[in-house]
Amino acid sequence: MSSALRTRLSVIEAARTYLGCPFHHQGRVRAGLDCIGLLVLAHQDAGLELKDCTTYARRPNPAQLLHHIERNFDEIPLDEAGPGDALVFWFQRPNRPMHVALLTDYGMVHTWSQVARGRGEQGKVVETGFPEAWRKRRHSAWRHPERED
C-alpha cells in the first residue's frame, strides 16, 4: 500500500471517529465541532498539520473560508477528487462557498448546524452518500499537500 493511500485512509478513519458528535460553531472537540473543525481534527489525528482559524462568523464569509482552505490545501480539478480530499460547497449562489466536507469511499463526512430533514436529528457529524443534489453544489476540490497521489 502506498504512503499516499495510507494517509488518505487515515484521514477518513479519523473523520469517522467523530460520527455522531454534535455541531458546535467553531468547535474543535468531540463535545462539538463545525465543518472546518472536523476537517482540522481529522487531518491532525492522521498526523497532518493544518493551520487552524476560529475567527469566523456563524454564517461563513466565502472569501475567508477559501482563504483558510487555500492556506492548508492545494486545489485540484473537481473530477480528480477522491476519498480523503476536501470539497467546498455553495448553497445559495455558486460564487459563495459556505461548507466543507471530506470525501470517503462511501460518500462524504461532514457536519452542519441544520436538523437532518425528516429525521428530527440535531446537527451532528454524519457520513452520507453523495447524491446528485450535493454534486451540483460543488464549488472546488482540495488535497492536502502531504498527500500527493
Image (tube, helix red, strand yellow):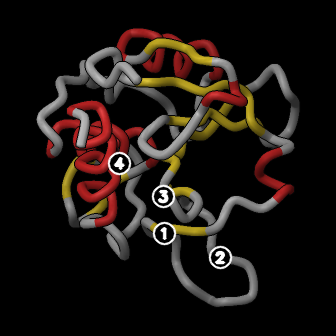
Residue linked to disc 3: 109
| Three-letter amino acid code at the position of disc 2 | Ala
Cα distance, mark 1 to mark 2?
10 Å
Relative image position of residue 12 (x, y in whole percent)? 34, 53
Relative image position of residue 68 (x, y in whole percent)? 43, 17
| Three-letter amino acid code at the position of disc 1 | Val
Q: Residue at x 55, y 14 (%)?
A: 75
Cα distance, mark 1 to mark 3?
6 Å
Labels 1 and 2 touching (C-beta < 8 A) = yes
Q: Secondary structure at mark 4?
A: helix
Cα distance, mark 1 to mark 4?
11 Å
Q: Secondary structure at mark 2?
A: loop
Dot 4 surroundings within 10 Å: few (below 14), some, or many (20 or more)? many
Cα distance, mark 3 to mark 2?
14 Å
Residue linked to disc 1: 126
Residue linked to disc 2: 116
Labels 3 and 4 touching (C-beta < 8 A) = yes
Cα distance, mark 3 to mark 4?
9 Å
**First of labels 1, 2 by sequence position:** 2
Labels 1 and 3 touching (C-beta < 8 A) = yes
Q: Secondary structure at mark 3?
A: strand
Cα distance, mark 2 to mark 4?
18 Å
Relative image position of residue 71 (x, y in whole percent)? 38, 10
Task: Give the quarter of the figure containing the C terminus.
Answer: top left
